[in-house]
Amino acid sequence: RRGRAVGFNLRRSRVVANRGRVVVAVRLVVRVVDRGGIVGGIVGRGVVRVVQAVRDAVVRGLHRVHDAGLARREVFDDRGRGRARDACARAAPSRQPRASARAAKTYSCCLSSSLLSRLAPGASIERYRRTTIAGPPRRVFGVRLSAVQLTMAATAERKDLEAFNASPRYRDELRATAAKLVAPGKGLLACDEPPNVLPQRMKQCWTSLEECDAAWRCGYRELMFTTPGLSRYVSGVILNEETVDQTMQGVSATKLLSSLDIVPGVKLDGGFAPMPGDPTQWRTAGLDALDAKCKKAKAAGCAFAKWRAPLKVDFTEAAVAAEADALACYAKICQDNGLVPIVEPDVVMDGAHGIVASARATKTALVRTFAAMDARGVDVRGSVIKTNMVRPGAAHAAAEDVDLVGAATVRVFADALPASLPGVVFLSGGMSEAFATNALAAINRDPGRAACPFPLSFSYGRALQQSCRDVWRGKAENYAAAQAALLDRARRNSEATKGISCDDDAATTSLHVAGGNRY
């Protein structure tokens, strides 16, 4: 159906005489095997011409009728079964000259005017009647054809191909947003810490926990968002659900960011907990209410969402299968609601394991995630991957070797990620600011980088904000200096996407949190 037939077989054909007319009744059975289509457009949206599509017996019967001309064939789609009805017009020998041998062996057919007008608006049926292709017979899918011309509406077929496995309503919008998020030299600012976590990450900025109310959290994030020139290096911001509803400078946070040419997004997963049946593994929650959350986020002005699925480096088959499917479900629900899904399988770097174990776990997690996304019908071109760099465990002796991280990450991504992916953004995963920046630079200047034909950028939280927090310390007089520190760190990471490292000995403090972020 819908123009994706790959072949046809004649089941029955007969020649009957009725009051001087010769009628050739041909029954075609169309078998649809896949969406791609080898001979696309035989039925449905393609503009079709079939020349002498009859078996030898029918051809011999037609040849005996020396002055029979094929008037018209109509091809139409009926519940997946294509049918062709041929009628040989009555030809009076005294009024119609005998057809030439070449013409007698060439029986052209075309779409009816009414069907063509539905499939290719504005097209002229005469255009397709004039063209006839003749040639030696050949066999295609068991049917003897002297010549076949498939004159297809190229634009319509291209649109069909683009719509394959996509969310048609928002497809173009999603792909444009995904491309903007991974624009050259830009990355994401992750500030999606929930209210109970944010104060614990910036204890240097308050003296009493009671200070850290909603207004305090809103003020700190407004400081970051309004940093002059931030949009030169930051394409999008991942918000917490609380921040989406907050007001900054008289407008909502999403409107403020949009006015600054920064794409607003929101974290929608419900955090993780021990996996039911296996408390040694993790399971991310939040799918039950996700559709309603997506609708609310879209209405609030968000253009993308994030879902993090943490995995231990020694994850079980059940754990990776469950998390991959949850990520795929989340991505599909987001796209159906007009949000670009940031899909985040995160292999947490706890322990003293080597880089080989990390590479194996990361590759498996990515491959399983994309397999699940394909099974769920997620449009890869309308999504972005956020994941970990391939590096040894935090307690390993070689944990701070940026060149090793760069080579391993590029090798795994080249094997595991599809070339059509808009881009990848890395989480900082507890790395120090300097190491996160230099590791990103090492990845982008690695000799094997050409095997990954998509942007490799950043989506850092602590690795972008730590210097800003150290300078601000909750004091109004440090406001401008804190913004300058944030802008400088964003600039350094922007340069790292081009393979340029930074020399920064002051930002080498590890930000690792054992067990991963508990949100």
Image (tube, grey):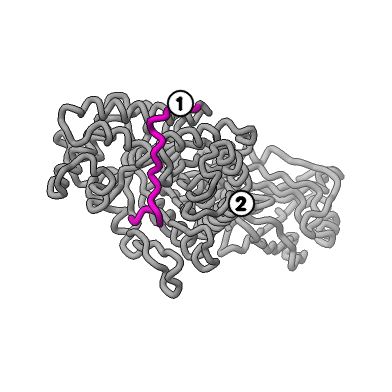
Residue 211 placement, left or right of 64: left
**Residue 513 sits inside the magenta stretch:** yes
The residue positioned 45% from the left and 26% from the top of the image is 503
First in residue order: circle 2 vs circle 1: 2
Provide the secondary structure element on which disc 2 rests. helix
Q: Is residue 360 visible?
A: yes
Q: Position of residue 89 (x, y in %)?
A: 70, 53
Q: Position of residue 37 (x, y in %)?
A: 65, 52
Q: Number of labelled discs?
A: 2
Q: Say which residue label 2 marks.
A: 356
Q: Which residues are magenta?
A: 501-519
Q: Quadrant of residue 7?
A: bottom right
Q: Quadrant of residue 256?
A: top left
Q: Say which residue label 1 marks.
A: 503
Amino acid bearing label 2: Val
Amino acid bearing label 1: Asp
Reply above or below: 272 against 485: below
In terms of depth relative to the viewer, which is nearer, 229 or 442? 442
